[in-house]
Image: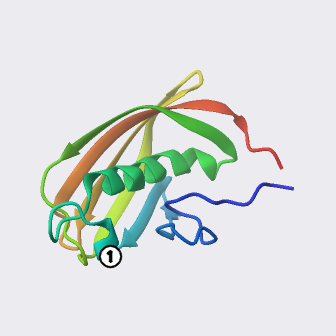
Amino acid sequence: MKEANYCFVCSKTNPKGLHIEFKYIDDIAVATFMLAREYEGYPGIAHGGILAAILDDAMGNVKYVQGYVAYTIEMYVRYIKPAYIGEELKVRGWIENIHHKIISTAGDIQDKNGMIKVRAKAKYYIAGPIKN
């Protein structure tokens, strides 16, 4: 039996998680979300670490839905504009390249008007298929 998903970002069963639900459109992981004050850094602004975790999940999840475990080995995050608490945001993650067991990905977080707030690139190691 496949182990239950308890991911901090996307699990529905983790009581302290963000419960972000991803959809897959043309091999891009997409989700809309809004962060509560518990995820604040500076007053009124979402904590950068939480935004990075959300991007990591979006970029890594593309391979997960294809049935593979892939571990983050490197991640670069560029914060462009503040993301505000209570603001509707959209995260996207996609694969740019796969070379042997290394996946190169990209992603972003944008507001409802399409303004990019955060960009990221990451590499993941494909450990193998998800064990059922």
Q: Residue furthest right?
A: 1
**Residue on which the image places disc 1:** 36
In-image side of 40 versus 16 (left or right): left
The number of discs equals 1
- Determine the residue positioned at 83% across, 50% down: 132
**Residue 87 picture location, percent across and down:** 23, 76
Mark 1 nearby-residue class (10 Å; few <14, some 14–19, many ≥20): some
Q: Quadrant of the N terminus?
A: bottom right
Q: Residue at x 25, y 78 (%)?
A: 86
Q: Position of residue 122 (x, y in %)?
A: 39, 36
71 relative to 100, above or below: below
**Does residue 38 appear in this view?**
yes
Identify the image quadrant of residue 77: top left
The answer to which of 26 and 58 lies nearer the viewer is 58
Left-right relation of 57 to 51: right
- Any part of residue 35 in sight: no
22 sits left or right of 100 in the view: left
Q: Residue furthest top?
A: 100
Whether residue 29 is situated above or below residue 125 in the rendered picture:
below
Left or right: where does residue 29 sit relative to residue 52? right
SS category of the residue bearing label 1: loop
* Scheme of image coloration: rainbow
Amino acid carrying mark 1 in the image: Ala
- Return the x and y of residue 92 as percentages of the image width and height: 38, 57
Q: Give the residue drawn at x 74%, y 44%.
A: 130
In the figure, 49 relative to 40: above or below? above
